[in-house]
Image (cartoon, rainbow, N blue to C red):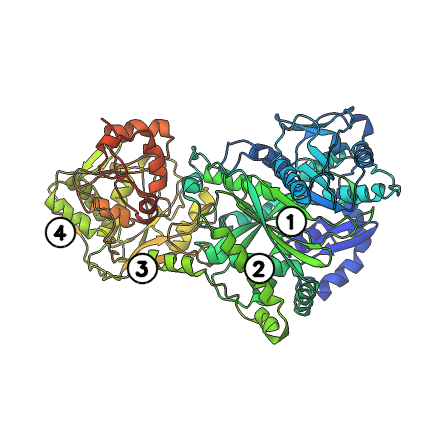
Amino acid sequence: MNIAELLARYADDGVVLWAQDGQLRFRAPQGRLTDTHRTELRTHKEAILRHLEAQQPALRADPERRHEPFPLTDIQAAYLIGRTDAYAYGGVGCHAYVELEYPDLDADHVTAVWRELVQRHDMLRAVIHHDGYQQVLADVPELDINADDLTGLPQTEAEAEVEHTRARLSAREKPTDQWPLFEVHVSRTAERAVLHLAFDMLVVDHASLRTLLAEFQRRHGGEPLTEAPRITFRDYVLARRALTETDAYTRDRAYWTERLDTLPPAPELPLAEAWEAGVSDPRETAHPAAPAESGTFRRLEVLLTAAERDRLIERAARRGLTLSAALLTAYAETVGRWSRTSRFTLNVPTVDRPDLHEDIGRLVGDFTSLELLAVDLDAPAAFAERTRFLGEQLLEDLAHPLFTGSEVLAELSRRAGGPVLMPVVFTSALGSGATSEGVPPEVTYAVTRTPQVWLDCQVMHRGDTLSLSWDIREGALARGVADAMFEAYTGLVRSLSAEGAAGDAAWDAPAGIALPEDQAVRRNAVNATAGRLPDSLLHEPVLAQARITPEAIAVRTPELTLTYQQLIARATAVAEALTASGLRPGEPVAIWADKGWEQVVAVFGTLMAGGAYLPVDTAQPPARRDTIIADAGVRTVLTQSWLAEIDDLPEDVTAVAVDLLPQMSQVAPAASATPRDPDDLAYIIYTSGGHRYAQGRDDQPSGRPQHRRGRQPPLRRHRARPCPRHRGTRLRPVRVRPVRAARRGRLSRPARRRPARRPLPLGRTRPGLRSHRVELGPRPAPHALRLAALRAPDRQRHTPTRADLRRLDTRRIARPGP
């Protein structure tokens, strides 16, 4: 029996094996470990244990080098970058603030205990250098702790001072290369004493904070601590990095690499207008300035009673579920109610403390790892059924922990050509029990902040209660959305914990989450697009405009300017080439081209030939591109000459370079169009899980395409109508977007269209916007940002209001240029 092959086979089945204290341990989704597996494991137990122990890097104490610099973990590096404004929703450190309440506290005694803890734990003496390294200082000054004696003040004034200290420490932001990276403060009033703790989460995680609180409580009570850990966080980091050289890491990397193309993007929640452009496309290089309050976080919290908590636990256990999985599912259902897409990814932090040493559980440091959990709410399901599926998916993902969520995000960002964010977070501390030094004291108040996070749902036991709290980044979501979501979330959890048959039945029915009345009214009004559909096809208004104004400019690029007559002439050439190749009605034709006039010509040529166009992003990996082409049954790819020269398309696909086709002369536009019916297939969209969805489309399971018919939806009456004087631009490639109403509205009237080859920063888009007097764009926020510096108030016909920017897809923004 080849033990390596056996372990690989088990890993493929989602069964993870490891050695602990001389025993063989396993983790597997429910029902995955069969009787055959168990028999096989008993038979080869000793051989498996020897193999696992030989494969596992040793974590050895290295006290002589404990003060030498060592690398950051993946999550530490992410937190460090998040302190800068390099990416959207950055500019804040990862920080935790907690309060403990006592009848009274002696400030000198508190100081002595924390000085002892500083000497006990290396990471309380650590600093983080901006070059990507951390270091434990050999010598640090004695820790100073400020204390406020407020016993002589009236209680209201004293509490106001406590609140002031809370506000100051909650917003604490200190340089990471200056010790200490935490602060302790004592407030004493006539009625109580408060211990304030503020920690930079670069040096501790949630479990480490619990360890510190338990040790403080023990020493504050006069009891001795156990022996200090024999290893350091530095020892762990170096041993953990060695795991990337193992076969197990290779298997985990393969698992997540295979998942990349189907992993949905983050939930698309209603964003505050000031941020919309900042995350609208990961390829954008400039982000808008954040609102003044956007770097601050606030907490919403509800405490469930012991009876409510116990009913949740009992009902979950009776169905073979865990409380943590149930609360995660309730969060997913709530997020999905507000998300524009029903498939999305949640960010689920976990603790990465591999069993490399018996003292690893007592170390203080940041052991956080990220798990990216795919959620699919497309099909209705009973709450318990949804919980079971998400729980199994989570367990399967956690069986491949060595390739971390941070590495998955890095690979997604590399493929997308820009940072990919997963800003909706679920953090569970329900599994945290007693530490080696006992049970930590009860936290009476807490708030956290994390860069690149909108919402962080945290669930934990608090005494006899169950705490459900959300830390919310101010200025990220639209006003009122987070509060309404939190109310819906807690309402759903309470319905699951309600007394009697109704509470029990809620588990076996779909989660019914209703929007608040005001938001429902607003959503219904925005979606009230009912109206008579015109009989014209997607391309027919453009053909009609070509007959009316053949010499008007239709498309302008840095390389070429096309009139309507020239546009239709080139599209006719494409249509004839497709017809000559034997294109069947409704047959998909892939458009694999960089941003340019060729894309526009290819779209209309395909439609005129009776085909259905399929946009394929040139930034996608070849494997993903080829999968789409094969799955759609594509025989012909319309592309550009420089891409055709690469010659890496599948062998059974014919590439046609649009820019090399001869331009037809004396074209009668309407005569070249193949007769079609409005219900014929017009285009196919593959919703990629790489970084975003096609706008206005729901995703389908397994990345299957969606089909839309060829009838043209009407422009709303209140939308702006372009005229011959107007110019429009598109700053992003087509990728998965069809010829939408905004494009059809501009090309079906003589408004010039100016595509850009690739997204450009403002400095490079400004000259083109000025010289061609661009006025129209497909989305207001990105264009408004680019035009802000170019606006001339005395020449504006219309200054858009907030309502205009939210409501209209196509409108006049400004008239740049003199």
First-in-chain label (3 vs 2): 2
First-in-chain label (1 vs 3): 1
Cα–Cα span, label 1 and label 3: 45 Å
The residue tagged 1 is: 400
First-in-chain label (4 vs 2): 2
The residue shown at (22%, 55%) is 537
Name above or below for residue 340 compared with residue 159.
Answer: below
Residue 248 shown left or right of residue 103 in the figure: left
User: Is label 4 in contact with label 3 (beta carbons under 8 Å)?
Assistant: no
Q: Nearer the viewer, residue 368 or 578?
A: 368
| Three-letter residue code for mark 1 | His
Q: Secondary structure at mark 4?
A: helix
Name above or below for residue 191 compared with residue 631.
Answer: above
Q: Nearer the viewer, residue 305 or 226?
A: 305
| Three-letter residue code for mark 2 | Thr
Which one is closest to the eye, mark 1 or mark 3? 3
Instruction: Please state the horizontal and vertical placement of residue 604, each as a whole percent of the image.
Output: 24, 47
Instruction: Please state the horizontal and vertical placement of residue 431, each as a whole percent of the image.
Output: 71, 54
The residue tagged 2 is: 490
Q: Secondary structure at mark 3?
A: loop
First-in-chain label (2 vs 1): 1
Which quadrant does the C terminus fall into?
top left
Instruction: Please state the horizontal and vertical placement of residue 721, each as a whole percent of the image.
Output: 21, 46
**Residue 54 shows in this picture:** no
Which one is closest to the eye, mark 4 or mark 2? 2
First-in-chain label (4 vs 1): 1
The residue tagged 3 is: 528
Cα–Cα span, label 3 and label 2: 30 Å
Cα–Cα span, label 4 and label 1: 59 Å
Badge number at residue 670: none
Cα–Cα span, label 2 and label 1: 32 Å
